[in-house]
Amino acid sequence: MKFANPEGFYLLFLIPILVIFFLKARKRKIQSLHKFGNITLLEKLTSSSGFKGKPHRYIFFLLALTFLILSIARPQWGTSMQTIKRKGLDLLIALDTSKSMLAEDIKPNRLERAKYEIAHFIDNLQGDRIGVICFAGTSFVQCPLTLDYAAAKLFLKAIDTQIIPIGGTAIGKAIEKSCQAFIKEERKHKVLILLTDGEDHESEPLEAAKEAAREGIKIYTIGLGSEAGEPIPLKNEKGANNGYLKDRKGNIVMSKLDQETLEKIALLTDGKYFHASSADMELKKVFEDIANMEKKELQSRKYTQYEDRFYFFLLPALFFLFLEFFLGEHRRVKKGWAGRFK
């Protein structure tokens, strides 16, 4: 047996409090009657009402309250078998974690805004498996494909620009890592969502995209920033702006978006390219587009579910309340005729 609302047991603390209250009330009543007159005479005069009160009424009330609290705690036992079938897609999100993602043209910065939007995107999923890949100069799987959306969001929350020590923006390596993370035997139901703000000078993203297309992976690319470029702010330990990132010659590094390459990656894999703005990361449009894609059965499990049995405790509670209500303070006294003057 288990209880669905175990916090209801805290109400049991009321029982000893009420016991103490009833005992004190009864004692005070008797003490008052002692002051009123002779006890023996009062017992004869009040034989039908019981001036000391009826303790079993209190007992019935406390029993009713105890069973009522047990029913509030929702006791459960017994099981039923349910077959749950899920249909969906395998979705991987490749997130750029290079230092350029600290640019603040999208508030509070590109990375934090992207994480927020991805978390909201995960909240809207129903049956799709989700995974997360981080990439900068190299890439790795931060969260493998899973139906546990809460776990995926925890992994997402841990991402920052320090998670990959190798700098750069190797989009091609991120795509290659995604190909490895998907199930090789399947040639459809696979989607990669790529969020980046930089140019790739370290890998071959278009060759990687062609390989992804052969694997049946559809890639949606989302470009952050602008082709003109954005400086990368440097923060001190207190979060204050400490200037901007500079190259070896002392020039401010500008993070430039290679929109043309991202468009080609999407085109090669039958996906789509979106340009993120300060108002919208465009993940909503990606969600709307993949919602119409063919789904596959990802999981079929049998769950054991406990049945609610609170009524087994609610019925005794009502019974004892009924007894307590109809007993009354007065009792019938059967006494034969003892004579006129007796």
Image (cartoon, rainbow, N blue to C red):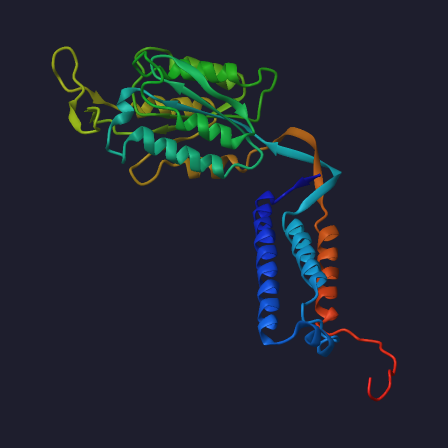
Q: Can residue 193 be seen here?
A: no
Relative placement, left or right, of 316 versus 198 is: right
Q: Quadrant of residue 135?
A: top left
Specify whether residue 203 is in view. Answer: yes
Give the vertical position of 313 relative to 27 (above or below).
above
User: Residue furthest toward the bottom?
Assistant: 340
Q: Position of residue 234 (x, y in %)?
A: 20, 23
Question: Could you tell me residue 49's position as x and y percent?
Answer: 71, 74
In terms of image quadrants, where is residue 45?
bottom right
Front position in the image: 162 or 227? 162
From the viewer's side, name the closer residue of 74 and 171. Answer: 74
Q: Nearer the viewer, residue 174 or 211?
A: 174
Q: Quadrant of the C terminus?
A: bottom right
Extreme left residue here?
Answer: 250
Where residue 119 sits in the image (x, y, percent)?
43, 34
Q: Residue at x 43, y 25 (%)?
A: 267
Residue 132 picture location, percent across and down: 45, 24
Residue 127's quadrant in the figure?
top right
Which residue is painted at 56% across and 47% down in the image? 10
> Is 127 drawn above or below residue 249 in the view shown?
below
Instruction: State left or right for residue 34 relative to residue 303.
Output: left
For image coordinates 70% across by 40% down, the residue present is 306
